[in-house]
Image: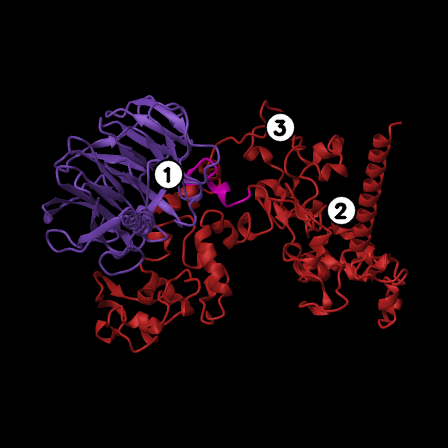
Chain colours: A purple, B red
Amino acid sequence: MNKAILRTFLIALVLVLPAGSFSAGTVKYMNIMSIYSDDKGAAVRNPEGVACDDESRLIIADTANHRLLRYVLKDRTLTSGEEIAAPQLTYPVLVKVNSAGDIFVLDGKQRRIVHLDAGGKFVGYLEPSGLPSPSSYVIKSFDIDADDNIYVSDIFSGRMIVLGPDGAYRAHINFPGDYGFISDLAVDFKGNVLLVDSVRSRVYSAAKGAQGFSPLTEGMKEQMRFPTNITTDNRGRIYLTDRNGSRIIVIGQDGSFLGLISELGWKEGLLNYPAQLCINAQGEMFVADTNNSRVQVFQLIK
Amino acid sequence: MRPDIMRLRQILVITLLAVCAFMTSSLAAADNKFRLKAGAAGEICLKCHEPFKEKLKARYLHTPVRNGECSGCHNPHTSPQGNLLDEVSTRICDSCHKKIVPENSVSAHKLVVAGNCVQCHDPHASGNRGVLVKGGNELCLDCHKDTAEKIKTARFKHKPVNEDCMNCHNPHASATLGFLLKEDVPALCIKCHRTDNPAFGRQHMNYPVAASRCNSCHDSHGSSRPVIIFEDVHAPVTDKKCNQCHEEAGSQNPLATKKKGVELCRGCHKEMVDMAFAKNRVHWPMLDRDGCLNCHNAHAAKQKKLLTGTVLYVCGKCHSDTVDLQRISKNNPKNTGLCEPVKNGDCVSCHSPHSSDYMLLQEKPSMSFDVCNKCHDWKTHSTHPVGEKIIDPRNKNLSVDCISCHRACGTGNKPSMSQFETVTETCIQCHKELERR
C-alpha cells in the first residue's frame, strides 16, 4: 500500500516539475482584433501612440496622418473611431489619458505636451513651471500616475521630473550614471518610476520617494534588441516594446524575465516595429504596430 | 637511551628516508616522462632532425628548445595533433605562458585570443628578440596594412611610431586600456612631450589642455597636416579661434563651452540645424546635452565631416543590434546579393542622420519605392506584382513592396536579405494554397 502511494507520488513529482518550470517562463496571450481605420474608413498610417483607460476609452496617435483617433472598446466590440485633429497638434508620437479622461499628447515635432480635454478640444501646452534650469529641458517621454501627476523624462539635463497636474514642478531625480539613452518611462500602481534604456537594453527603477535610480535588470541584449517603450499592468508586471526586435518583453517587478509576446510579421497577431503600448484593467493590451500601420489588441490571459 | 625509544627513532628515520627517496624518484620521472637516457634529451631528436641543428644557431631560442626539451611540446611517439604536438596548436603555448591575456582585459590582440601565437613567434628559434618571426615594425605592419600605408605616406611623422610600435602598444593585451595601449593618454604622450614648456601653451592658445586627451585632435600615427593633427579639422581650430566655442583662455573655466548641446553648434551651423528642426522627427541624440558631439568631434577627426569614426562605428555606438545584423549578413556566404550600402555599412545611404519627416529617419517617404529605387528598378525586379496599388494580402494597410520580402538592414543568416529562411516560406506568406500541410 505504502509502496503504491510512494510510486504515485514520485510519478506525479516527475510530471509536475517540468510543467511548472515551463509555465513560469511563458506569458499567455491571444490576439483579439486589429484596428486598421477610422470611422470613415480612412486607413491608419504608422501609429506610434496608444492610450487606454478602465472606462473602455482608447486613443490612438495616428502619427503619419498627424491626428488622434478615439474609440470605445467594450465587450470586445469596437465603436466610434472619430478623428481628433487640433491645429496645435502636428506630429503625435505618444499619448496618455488622466483620470478625468483628458488627453495628453507628446508632439514629436514641437517636443511639447499638448493638452486636450476629454472631448478633444485644445486646452493648452503643458509647460513646466518652477523648473530648475528651464532652458536645459528637452522632453522625450512622459507618464501620468493615478493622482494625475505627470512624470517627464528630460534628455537634455538627464533627469526625471515630477510635475503636478497643473504642470508645477515638484521634484526631480537624475538619470543613473551609466545610462545609454533613456527612451521612455512609466509609473506603476505603487508609484515606482521605471526608465527604459534602449542602448543598454536595461530597466532602471526608483521606488516612490527614492532619491536615485538603480538597475532593475542587467543588460537584456539576449532578450531585447532595442527597447523603446515601457508600461505596467495593474499587477505590477512590466511590458517593454522591443522596437527593432518587433515583440513585447514581459518582466516581473523584481526584473526577472517572464516571457515574450509576438514576433516580427505582417499577419494579425504579429508586429513590425511596434511603439507605445497600453494595458487596461481587463487585461487588454493595445500595441501601436507602427510599420504595420495598425493597432493590435491582445488579451492577456492570467 | 631506552631500547624501545631507540627502535622508534630508527623506524622514523627509515620511513623519512623512504618517503624522500620515493618523492625524488617521482619528480625525476615527471621531469623525464619518456625515461630518456642521461644526455639523450634533445640530442636524440637531432639524430634524425639534422637540418634543425642549423636553426638552433639562431641568437634567440625558445627556452624548452635551449634546454633540449623537445618533449616539452611534442610527443615523440604519437599524437592526434599535427607535428606530434602534445596539445592543440592554439592552446599549447598556454600550458607554460599563462595569463598572457589578463582576465576581463579591455583590449586583446585578436591573434593572441585565437591562440595563433606562431603568426608572430617562432616556436623554436629566431634572430629576433622574443623569438619573433620578424623584427621591428615589419611584423605588425604586415597585417596592419592601413596603418602601414598611413605611416608611409604621412608627410608629418611621429618618431616613436617609426621606431617601434611597442613604444606605445602592448602586443598581447591591455588590462585596462583600449587599443592595446601601455598607458592611458595623455600620460603616454607626456613621457616625451613636456606640457610645462611655454611653447606647448602657445601652440594651444594658452588653454590648459595638458590633461586633455591628445588623440582627440592629433593622429599618433602621422598626418599630412602639421603637428600631426587629424586630416579633417574644424574651421575654428584651424583658425586658432578656440574662444569661438570655449570661454576665454584666461577665464575661470576656460575649457567650458559658451553654450550647451546643439545650441553651441547652431551659432555657425544655423541653416543646417534649423532645417533639421523643421522636420517631423529629429534624431533624439541631437537634443541631449552632448548634442552634435554624440557623433562629431568638435576639434579634428580622421573621418570626413568630423565624424568620431566610420558611419558604421558611429551608428553602432547606440544601434549595436542593427550593426550586429549587418555584420552577420556581411559574413554570411549565402548573402551574395547583399545590398551595397549594407555591405559597406553606409547607413546614411537610406537614413537621414539628423532628421526626417518619415519613419526610421528614412530619407524618403517609402523605403521601397523611394529609397531602394535609388539603386534597384523594382518595377522590373520580377513578374510578381509590386507597387503602391498592390495591397498586401496579409495586411490591408500595406502595399506589396521590397520590404514585404526583404529586410533593408540585412537579415543575418538568411539569404539575399530575405525576411524568410526559404523561397517557399516567402511565397506561402500570401499564397496559402501552396502551403504543405
What residue is rendered at 24% in x and 42% in y? Answer: A278
Q: Which residues are magenta?
A: B286-297
Residue B400 position, x and y percent, is 27, 67
Q: Is residue B210 above or below residue B309?
A: above
Camera-nearest residue between B216 and B304: B216
Instruction: Give the CA distance from mark 2 to mark 3.
Output: 33 Å
Which circle, 2 or 1, is nearer the viewer? 1
Tell me the number on the disc at residue B249. Answer: 3
Tell me the crowding category of disc 2: few under 14, some 14 to 19, or many 20 or more residues within 10 angstroms, Cα based.
few
What type is the residue that disc 3 sits on?
A: Ala
Q: Secondary structure at mark 3?
A: loop
The residue indicated by pointer 2 is: B167
Q: Position of residue A179 (x, y in %)?
A: 45, 37
**Left/right of residue B234 with respect to residue B362 in the rendered view:** right
Mark 1 residue element: loop
**Residue A99 found in image quarter:** top left
- Residue type highlighted by circle 1: Gly
Q: Is residue B296 magenta?
A: yes
Closer mark to the observer between disc 1 and disc 3: 1
Q: Position of residue B97 (x, y in %)?
A: 72, 51
| Location of mark 1 (residue) | A255
Q: Amino acid at mark 2?
A: Asn
Residue, far front? B3
In the displayed structure image, the side of residue A289 where residue B344 appears, left or right: right
Chain at numbered mark 3: B
Left or right of A285, for residue A140: right
Between the C-alphas of marks 1 and 3, the distance is 49 Å
Q: What SS does tag 2 mark? A: helix
Callout 2 and callout 1 share a chain:
no
Confirm or deny contact between disc 1 and disc 3 (CB under 8 A): no
Nearer mark to the viewer, of 2 and 3: 2
